[in-house]
Structures are given as C-alpha cells and as structure tokens.
Amino acid sequence: MNQEFLYIIIILGFGYLLKRLNILQEKDGAVISKIIFKITLPALVLVTFDSVKIETSLILLPVIVLIFGIITACLGLFVFKNERRELKGSLLMLSSGFNVGLFAFPLVYAIWGLDGLTYFSMFDVGSSFIVFGICFIFASYYSEEGLKLNPVEILKKLGKSIPLMTYLIASILNLIHIQLPDTIIHVASKISGANMPLSLLLLGLFLNFKFDKQFIKPMMKFLAFRYGLGLIVGLVLYFILPFDTMFRYTILIGLLLPVAASALTFAVEFKYSTNSTRFIATMSNITILVSIVILYIFANFI
C-alpha cells in the first residue's frame, strides 16, 4: 500500500513540476478536467457498476450524504454569519460537497479496487446533488448580483452533469439486472484506465502553496469546522450504522474528503472577486493535502 501511495505522490508531483517548468499551465487543466468528467470518469462508472452487485443498503449512502450536506449548510450559516458577504458565500460553498470523482477514486481504487469504487460512486451521487443544489444556491445568493434562484436552472445543472447521469443510469441498469454489451464494457474499460493518472496530474497541476495572510484566520476556522464536523459525524455513523465495514468506511472517509472542485467554477460563473477565487483555490489545495494524509493514515494504520 505504501508503494501505491508513492506512485500517487509521484504523479501528483509530476503534474506540479510540469506547471513549474511551464510545460503545462493551469488553463490547460480545463481541457484535462473536461476529458475526466465527460469521458474517463463515466467510463469508469460503467465498468464499476457492470462488474459488481449493488446491495440495497447502498441506496442509503447518497441519502445520508445529502442529509449531512443540508445539516452542514445550516450550521455553516451560523458559524460564518459574521464574515463579509462574498467571503461568507465562498466558505459556505466550500463547506458542502466533496471531491469524489477527481480525488477519491484514484486512491480508493488503489486501496479497495472496484468494490470500493462502487461504494464511493454511490457516495458521489449524494455529493452531486449537494454540489449542484445547495452549493449552487449559496454561490448565487452571495454573489454581487444576488440570488437568481431558478429550480429549472438547478435541474438543468443536474441533468447536464454527465457523471451524475452515468451514476443514475448505471445504478438502475445494475438494480434491474441489465448488462451492457461486452464490446461497450471492453472499450469503457480501456478508456477508464486513463482516469487515475489524468486525475492525479490535474490535481498536481492545480497545486498552489501561495495565499494571502488576511485569509489565515478564515482558513483555520473553515478547516476546523469542515474536518471537525466530518470527523465527529463520520465516527458516530461508523459505530452506530448496522451495515458492512466498507459502507461505514465510505461514510467515515467520505466526510473527510477535499472540497468539491465545482466551488471554483461557481465562483467564476457568478463573478466573485479575484481574492475570493484565489481563496477558494487555496482551500481546495489545502484540503487535498490534508485528505491525502488522512487516507494514507487510514490505509496503513487502521
């Protein structure tokens, strides 16, 4: 397992080195991101759901994640109530949602293989609804132009999420015992092989260790809130839920994953200031590093 993590760190470092040498730039990450979310990740989901059996209990995973997201949003409104408007919006966006497909999948596959991906795929279904529902509302409400809440727009966001639609379709096909043709699965399997290295390269490309000193206090406050709440709820659910170990591992680890990558996208979409977008990008980087350490400890000592 240490060797697998070494490979992961090397690929992450290689992505960061490519940026430092100006061979690739962060703007190139937009193209890589589209390839991952629209091609390699959906292919991986198809392969994963085709080869495993979804237990009925797994349907509860996205429900638990969605409830946790709602609770987090409510608590966040209280914890960050004294922050200035745009910073408050940034913190609330960051508080809800998780980076599952891009960050967790490569590491989960290295630790638990396809069986682990099945659980985390269901976790990501719940996270997707949080990201394109709760986070989208916060991003819009605390923007300079204010809230433009349109349920149709939110549904469009959900409907245009190729990974989410792939999750839903693949889950339904699995539950009703319909398998895709072998040719499709074989091709998808070949394509999905690129998901792990591309995801890690992209994460490395976006690593940035610079941040404004004015944000140190809100950073510490946010990290304490996000990881403190995630750890407390994760441990409680781990010990009280009457499901298999992998289900409980998924909840415990999932609630400690990095912030959703879409927070930065929403900040740009709703014209947040440069300082706010940099803050969001920095927090994304920090939570990635923190979560890597957590997963390493979990994989090797628990």
Image: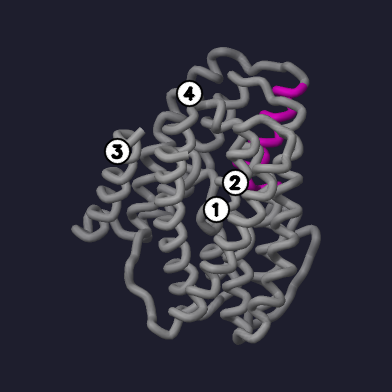
Q: Residue furthest top?
A: 182
Name the foreground residue: 117 vs 29.
117
Relative to 109, does residue 136 appear above or below in the rendering? below
Q: Amino acid at mark 1?
A: Leu
Disc on the earlier residue, 4 or 2? 4
The numbered dot on residue 252 is 2
Q: Quadrant of residue 290?
A: bottom left
Disc on the earlier residue, 1 or 3? 3
Q: Amino acid at mark 2?
A: Leu
As measured in the structure, the alpha-carbon distance from the residue carrying label 4 to the one carrying label 3 is 21 Å
Look at the image and give the residue range highlighted in magenta: 159-175
Q: Is residue 212 left or right of residue 154?
A: left
Q: Which residue is mark 1?
A: 256
- Residue at 52% in and 37% down: 41
Q: Which residue is mark 4?
A: 189
- Residue at 63% in and 50% down: 234
Q: How many C-alpha atoms fall within 10 Å of the one at disc 1: few (<14), some, or many (≥20)?
A: many
Q: Whole-percent x and y of residue 123? A: 64, 42
Foreground: disc 4 or disc 3: 3
Q: Which residue is mark 3?
A: 7
As measured in the structure, the alpha-carbon distance from the residue carrying label 4 to the one carrying label 1 is 29 Å
Q: How many C-alpha atoms fall within 10 Å of the one at disc 4: few (<14), some, or many (≥20)?
A: some
Q: Whole-percent x and y of residue 65? A: 69, 49
Q: Please report contact status of discs 1 and 2: CB closer than 8 Å, yes or no.
A: yes
Foreground: disc 4 or disc 2: 2
Q: Quadrant of residue 21?
A: bottom left
Q: Please report contact status of discs 4 and 3: CB closer than 8 Å, yes or no.
A: no
Q: Please report contact status of discs 4 and 2: CB closer than 8 Å, yes or no.
A: no
